[in-house]
Amino acid sequence: MTEITKLTVYEALNGLKKKDFTALELTEAYLRNMESGKKYNAYITESADVALQQAKEADKRYAAGTARALEGIPLGIKDLFCTKDIRTTAASHILDNFVPPYESTVTQHLLDDGAVFLGKLNLDEFAMGGSNETSYFGPVINPWSKDKPLVPGGSSGGSAAAVAAHLCAAATGTDTGGSIREPAAFCGITGIKPTYGRCSRYGIVAFASSLDQAGPIAQDVRDCALLLKSMAGFDDKDSTSCDVAVPDYEKFLDGDVRGLTFGLPKEYRPDGLNPEVSAYWDKAAEYLKARGANIKEISLPHTKYALATYYVLAPAEASSNLARYDGIRYGFRAKEGQHLDDLYINTRTQGFGAEVRRRIMIGTYVLSAGYYDAYFLKAQKMRRLIYNDFMNAFKQCDVILTPTSPITAFPIGDESMLQNPINMYLNDVFTVSVNLAGLPALSLPIGLSADGLPYGMQLIGKPFDEGTLFNAAAKLEADAKFERK
Ligand code: GLN
């Protein structure tokens, strides 16, 4: 392992500025790691030529004194962001030959700030999943695996594994129901799902449009702050993008937590909650208290309906969004078939994997005329009640502190998850409400389990209050000392 690839983004920027190494050297070091790290299956497409070109450009800018905010920082991009002239697959057979003629707004922001793109990272197919096992390109292996290969979490499993294994300095992710936070937790790193509308969705392959948000996955809180500053911002190409100024998030890192009130929702501690999860949660609360914060038990009474609500609404939106993949205009087209219907049916049957087909079926069902009121409409009403729960809670606290996931990374191919998708969905119990309410939430590593696997802690904030999350997370991070990868 080349040592410069162990640096955080912040440290690497300093190294580049001080001319300790060049952007080309840094990029080449990551490309070597990618070669030796192929066993993780983190990348779907590598873009070495593009990266080397961008790195040379970055070195010219450092020499000329015109370096930008992320000049020469090698990033991995979740393969859900359209990247101009670089294949973008959404980890699906149906898009495995798709080369976008345009760039997503978020990746354009990163390019405009001088980032280097190493390649496109693996994920669950169309970001549907919590283990990265639904990818057409095969599962990603968690770098924390010991005797047997473990999942990295999903859907941004390639992003989390690549950051943890130093196959990129940081990565982009997307989060519809936990897909930034859960893999970050499983891989012992940090990620933030910003407020809905904070980052533009333009050019991100859509899963569930009212829930999808882009965000960074990185080695630590400061790197997430640096990355989000670049990724965020109003975009008139996305009608749900919000015209709210993006603060300099790094400024929040030196703040303190005195006087802040952290709410601990009692519904997140059901009987039978893993005692290790419970213990880390209490430890984090005590740590914050010792630094002058107030800790308060709060209630989010509709929590028990969150998973059911999410797994009606997300498939409903997915079934509508995925209707565009018909084999006519772009992507995979099945060869057999006499009639137009055959073309659609064969293309979609062969092009989509089992989990995506399941969601399309569920989504189409809950939107159908006879069931719309009973399922879709009911779920929309419940979504509002869940949102109201949070708004009521935020009258009593500034930040909500919860675990990110009830479990640590599990083995690839675990029968109990794969045979029964509901078990997989249950892992999202602490993350989906945040998306339903459109709130920002950050996951950071808090400690290891008895068998040496990382747990994540989640901080949920008020709309557009990512800054307070960075402040609190920076404090907690200082406490959670353990051997990183
Ligand atoms: N695990 C959740 C799902 O399968 C969340 C996925 C996501 O956030 N993209 O839908």
Image: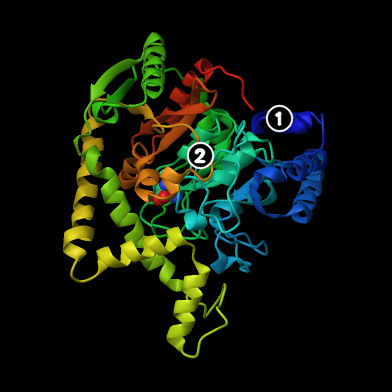
Image quarter hosting the N terminus: top right
**Front in this rendered view, residue 451 or 387:** 451
Give the label on residue 411, or none. none
Measure the alpha-carbon separation of dots 1 and 2: 19 Å
Is residue 443 depicted above or below 432 in this figure? above
Residue 258 percent location from the top left of the image? 38, 14
Label 2 crowd bin: few (<14), some (14–19), many (20+), radius 10 Å: many
Residue 431 percent location from the top left of the image? 37, 39
Q: Mark 2 belongs to which amino acid? A: Pro
Q: Mark 1 belongs to which amino acid? A: Lys
Label 1 crowd bin: few (<14), some (14–19), many (20+), radius 10 Å: many
Contact flag, marks 1 and 2 (Cβ < 8 Å): no
Secondary structure under tag 2 reads helix
Image quarter hosting the C terminus: top right
Foreground mark, 1 or 2, reads 2
Residue 76 vs residue 240: left or right? Answer: right
Give the label on residue 183, or none. 2
Is residue 280 depicted above or below 203 in this figure? above
Q: Residue furthest bottom?
A: 338
Q: Can I make out residue 90 in this image?
A: yes
Which residue lies under the disc numbered 1? 6
Residue 22 percent location from the top left of the image? 82, 37
**Front in this rendered view, residue 276 or 478:** 276
**Front in this rendered view, residue 157 or 49:** 157
Q: Classify residue 165 by image quadrant.
A: top right
> Mark 1 vs mark 2: which is more N-terminal?
1
